Image (cartoon, rainbow, N blue to C red):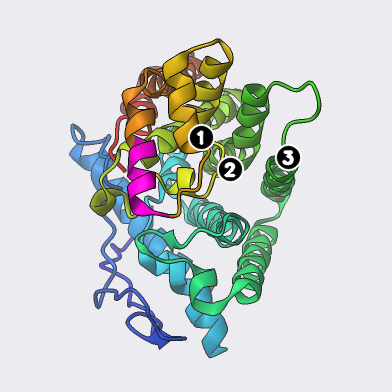
Amino acid sequence: MTESKVSGVKAGAAAGQTVSGTQLPKSNDTLSVPLPAGFDVLADDDLLTAQVTESLEAVEEQLLAALSCTDELANSAARYLAEAGGKRIRPLLTILTSLLGEGVNERVLRAAVVMEMTHLATLYHDDVMDSAPLRRGAPSAHEVWGNSVAILTGDLILARASQLMTELGDDGSRIQAETFERLVMGQLRETVGPREGEDPYDHYLGVIANKTGSLVAAAAQLGAYYGRTDPGHSQLLQTYGEAVGIAFQLADDVIDLTAEGASSGKSPGTDLREHVLTLPVLLLRRAAQSKDSSAQAALDLVDRDLTGDAELAEAVRAVVAHPVTEEAWAVARGWSIRAKEAISPLPESTVKSALLSFADAVVDREA
């Protein structure tokens, strides 16, 4: 652990500014970092909670420092999404898995920062490709600065993350490079779509395994590696992390339909409006192909122009009312169970219990 507790992080100058007519989200004078909402998996262990909370605060401080630039535009754009918030589940997982071994040290903290930076960079890119208007309740970066600046900001953050990881050297750099390759391949496969004869459901699971699962798996691996846990546990934790990441994304697919806008940071049905392929829609198409008339009726609403709020709300209601929504929840919980099964060989400990609760928390949340 770091010896001194980090009380907070000074907010960046970008907060509260107006850029291209858009008011940026305001930060408090300091950024306090409690356990991510919905992921309070350590409530029964005050000491472990204190260790994790202190470590997350240190990660937040280092994250904002790593994103800071002397160039005003680069500084505002690079810190934009970090200051807008986020669950920080990847740093949390890096910290937790390190505690299976010798615990948190500066290398663990650095790896946690790199994992969050890599995640942030992909959000800049994803929002451009999806034409997403909002991210974390605020206008997406490309809505504020345009596509080119958003893409280049994502590239800048990836470059910074790679530089930080290279300074650590050893196998960590290899893990990050392999993960980055999977992230790109996942985005490429999503962009191209299923090949001829490929099952769309299997294609989608492969995409999210690469785009989401790989980075969560790397977070678990790196925490274990730099925390000097038993080397024999590395594969278990990689499998656990990938399953957790898949469960998290599948739950996100359903939450897009069911969450209230105030809690999720976006209006219900954002994915439907943008015609982004998600698990409930995949299951709906499968049901329609099986001559389910109610599924076909809901699909007809989903496939039309959803620019209008009334049309979108009607489509959302139709999908939520259909059994495919509960089926999607069941699929997400199934991956959570796989994650827990993956670490069953680990010795019993408070940290293992926290990891088991973490796997439940990625699904059992409202946003």
**Foreground of the two, 233 or 255:** 255
Q: In percent of the image, x 56 and y 62: which residue is there?
A: 124
Q: In percent of the image, x 45 and y 20: which residue is there?
A: 295
Q: In percent of the image, x 53 and y 38: which residue is there?
A: 303
Q: Residue 50, can we see it?
A: yes
Residue 141 badge: none
Q: Are marks 2 and 1 in contact (CB under 8 Å)?
A: yes
Residue 358 magenta-highlighted = no
Q: Secondary structure at mark 2?
A: helix
- What x and y, as percent, mark residue 237? 54, 28
**Which quarter of the rendering shows the C terminus?**
top left
Q: Which residues are magenta?
A: 308-316
Residue 262 versus residue 339 in the image, above or below = below
Q: In percent of the image, x 50 and y 48: which residue is there?
A: 305
Determine whether, in the image, residue 9 is placed left or right of residue 143. Answer: left
Q: Which residue is mark 2?
A: 215
Distance of mark 3 from mark 1, alpha carbons? 18 Å
Distance of mark 3 from mark 2, alpha carbons? 17 Å
**Foreground of the two, 185 or 143:** 143
Binning the other alpha carbons within 10 Å of mark 1 as few (below 14), some (14 to 19) or many (20 upward) gives: many
Distance of mark 2 from mark 1, alpha carbons? 8 Å
Residue 313 magenta-highlighted = yes
What kind of residue is marked 1? Answer: Gly
Q: Which residue is mark 3?
A: 189
